Image: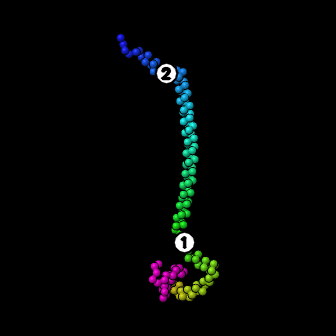
Amino acid sequence: MSLIPPSSAIVSATLPAPESLGAQIAAIEAQLHAVSEAKRQHSKAMSGLDSHASQLTKKLATLSEVQAKLRAGVVISDHALVRWLERHYGMDLEPYRQEMANALSQAVAVGASGLKTAHGVFKIRDGVVTTYVKLGSAA
C-alpha cells in the first residue's frame, strides 16, 4: 500500500480551476492598470513639483543676492559725490580746482609723481592729479 498519491493527483489538487484563473488574471491586469495610472499621475505631479522647486530656487537666489547687496551698503564714488554737491547743493568747486591747479602746475610740468604740502600729499600719474592724502592718514 502506497501513501503517496500519483503525480497527476498532486498537480490537479494544487492548481485552481481554469475559470478562476481567468478571473485572477483579469483582477491582476486591472491592478497593473491602476498602478500604471497612479504612477503616471504621480510622475506628472513630480514633474510639476520639480518645476516649482526650480522656480523657488531661482527666487531664493535672487532674494539672497538682494539681501547681500543691502547688507553691504551703497558704495558712492568720489566723482558721484562731487557731482551731487555741485548739482544738488549748487556748490561751485571751480575755485578749489583752480587753487589746486596753481599749487600743482610746476610739479605736473616737471613730471613729478606727487607734491607734498604742509598738510598732505597730492598724487600725480601721467600728468593727472589722482588723489590727495592727508598727512597722518592711511592710504
Taking depth in this image into account, of 98 and 29 the one nearest to the observer is 29
Number of numbered discs on residues: 2
Label 2 sits on residue? 16
Check disc 1: other Cα within 10 Å, few if <14, some if 14-19, many if 20+. few
Residue at point 63%, 78% (across, down): 88
Q: Farthest residue toward the top?
A: 1
Most common SS among magenta residues: strand
Q: Secondary structure at mark 2?
A: loop
Which three-letter amino acid code belongs to the residue tagged 2? Pro
Residue numbers of the magenta segment: 114-139
Q: Position of residue 117 (x, y in %)?
A: 49, 87
Vertical comparison of 117 with 9: above or below: below
Which three-letter amino acid code belongs to the residue tagged 1? Val
Q: Secondary structure at mark 1?
A: loop
Label 1 sits on residue? 75
Q: Position of residue 50 (x, y in %)?
A: 55, 48
Residue at point 35%, 11% (across, down): 1
Q: Position of residue 66 (x, y in %)?
A: 55, 63
Residue at point 58%, 78% (across, down): 82
